Image (cartoon, rainbow, N blue to C red):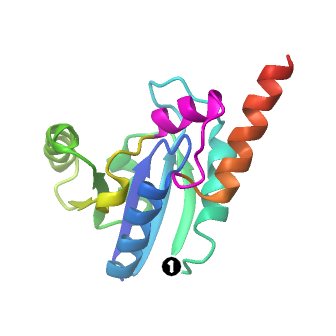
Amino acid sequence: MVVAVYPGSFDPITLGHLDVARRAASIFDQVVVAIYDRPLKNLLFSAQQRAALVREAVADLPNVRVDTYSELTTSYARRVGAKVIVRGLRAATDFENEFQMAHINHRLLPSVQVVCLMANQEHTFLSSSAVKEIAALGGPISDMVPPVVERALRAVYLERKGQ
């Protein structure tokens, strides 16, 4: 059984992330969408909130499970018995960063392979940061995120407006 870990902050998960998760699920026996709970980023949702959103978004994928972690990705991959780390690529700039991280991960855990899946062309412009900014300004995001995420973003920004 080949277990793949698809790590990220997923703050929030976008349709681009889901596209990569779906394609990974069609390749590997089990995919763990692993939500890193300590990224050096300004997060909108807690790790638990992000996990709940991702769980609902991938509920139709029986071989995908969601987890959180706060250690090195390679340590997490070893702990869950993963043989693969899945990464998504949107643009050439992603490639440089992922190329570097793949080599670092290989040095830390040579037994795990890094597989990069290119985002579907319709999702190459998507980023969680852009989605959050559009949502904060009341713009349309229904073609960028799953419905559960759209509702959560609208609720957060509505609450912030009310304060």
**Residue at (78%, 22%) from the top-left corner?**
160
- Magenta residue check for 1: no
Looking at the image, which residue sits at the far front?
139
Q: Is residue 119 visible?
A: no
Q: Where's the C terminus, which quadrant? A: top right
In the image, the segment drawn in magenta is 128-144
Residue appearing at x 54%, y 40% in the figure:
11
Q: How many callouts does the rendering have?
A: 1
Residue 61 or residue 153, whichever sits in front: 153
Which quadrant of the view contains residue 147?
A: bottom right
Q: Which residue is mark 1?
A: 63
Residue situated in front as seen by the camera: 37 or 61: 61
Q: Indicate whether residue 137 is drawn in magenta.
A: yes
Q: Residues within 10 Å of mark 1 (few under 14, many from 20)?
A: some
Residue 109 placement (x, y as % from top left): 22, 52
Task: State whether residue 8 appears in this view.
Answer: yes
Residue 128: x and y, percent? Answer: 48, 39
Taking the image as shown, residue 110 lies to the left or right of residue 48, namely: left
Q: Residue at x 72, y 45 (%)?
A: 152
**Mark 1: amino acid:** Asn
The image quarter containing residue 85 is: bottom left
- Residue sitting at 35 percent across and 45 percent down? 125
Q: Secondary structure at mark 1?
A: loop
Q: Position of residue 87 (x, y in %)?
A: 30, 54
Residue 112: x and y in percent read: 23, 61
